[in-house]
Amino acid sequence: MKPTVTIGMCVRNCQNMLPNALESIDIQDFPHEKMQLVIIDDGSTDQTPKIAEGFVSKTDIPIKVFKTGWQGLGKARNLVLNNADGKYITWVDSDEIITKSYIRKQVEFMEKNPEVGITTGFTGFVPGNLVLNLELTPYMVKHFMFNEPRSYLWRARKLVGTGGATFRVEALRQVNGFSDKFKGAGEDIDAVIRILNSGWVIQVNDAVFYEFHNGLSTLGDLWKKYYWYGYHCEQLYHRSRDAYSLARMNPPAGFIAGSLYSLKAYRLFGDKSLFLLPFHFCFKMTSWMFGFMKAQTKN
């Protein structure tokens, strides 16, 4: 039976988090014979390949596992696309856990909305991790505001990344997939923009998944994460100025954005700790700016 949905995983050195992600896929209530899992291990030096290959014998979901040298996310995602037999690709990162009904809800939503090229569920709070929950809050606010008109908070185009998102294979192939030029970050937003420009629609659905951002729990983790993003997104900025605005990617703008998000988030979730968002945003935008500047001096 040809699968309806391909689950794409691009992994690298994630031995501590990958087992939980794979288990969440294995317990999906969507018929396993209509699913396909494609795992790309892109140059891991830990036990990640062994975990991925060992999962083949533990599940009844058809699996393809590929091991490549460090070629980057653009090429890894295209390798998933080239081996996808499903109508849709749901991207699950190694640091994500999808709820039991996640795949079923993704497929049902896409089947009912043929104009939608990309859909995604929303992240849930993780108990006991303040830094991670502050990081997740803007994504949750954006989800609840997605269908609202642009406002002071929603000035940018409404984009989503790949994590937890479901892409229509037809839409991806129409824009020739992902750009191989992106090794570290930005390959997803670049593809999303091209899909939108081709006339497809992005919509959100009510499925829930949990994202752990590679074990993010301290300010040190947050600094490393956004320094890395800033460094690699410098390439995306030169390729597509629509991806983000430099005027908003700096500490003062971060503080303002965090303040606006905190007000909306408190109204939605009622947690006073969310008033720390201005400082959280300021800190991570400082890190992003240093990474971006480092990439510019290198180039």
Image: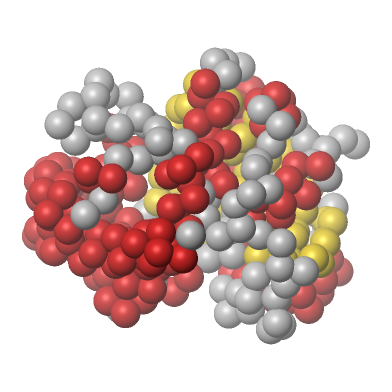
- Judged left or right of residue 100, residue 10 is right
- Residue 13: percent from left, percent from top: 63, 76
Q: Where, by quadrant of the figure, is residue 23 drawn?
A: bottom right
In the image, residue 237 above or below residue 61: above
Q: Where, by quadrant of the figure, is residue 146 drawn?
A: top left
- Judged left or right of residue 171, residue 205 is left
**Residue 284 in sight here:** no
- Judged left or right of residue 291, residue 176 is right
Viewer-closest of 250 and 265: 250
Viewer-closest of 233 and 271: 233
The extreme bottom residue here reads 46
**Residue 225 in sight here:** yes
- Residue 87: percent from left, percent from top: 74, 31
Residue at x 35%, y 30% (from the top left corner): 157
* Total number of numbered discs in the rendering: 0
In the image, residue 184 above or below residue 103: below
Viewer-closest of 266 and 280: 280
Residue at x 57%, y 27% (from the top left corner): 195
Viewer-closest of 275 and 207: 275
* Colour setup of the view: secondary structure
- Residue 46: percent from left, percent from top: 69, 83
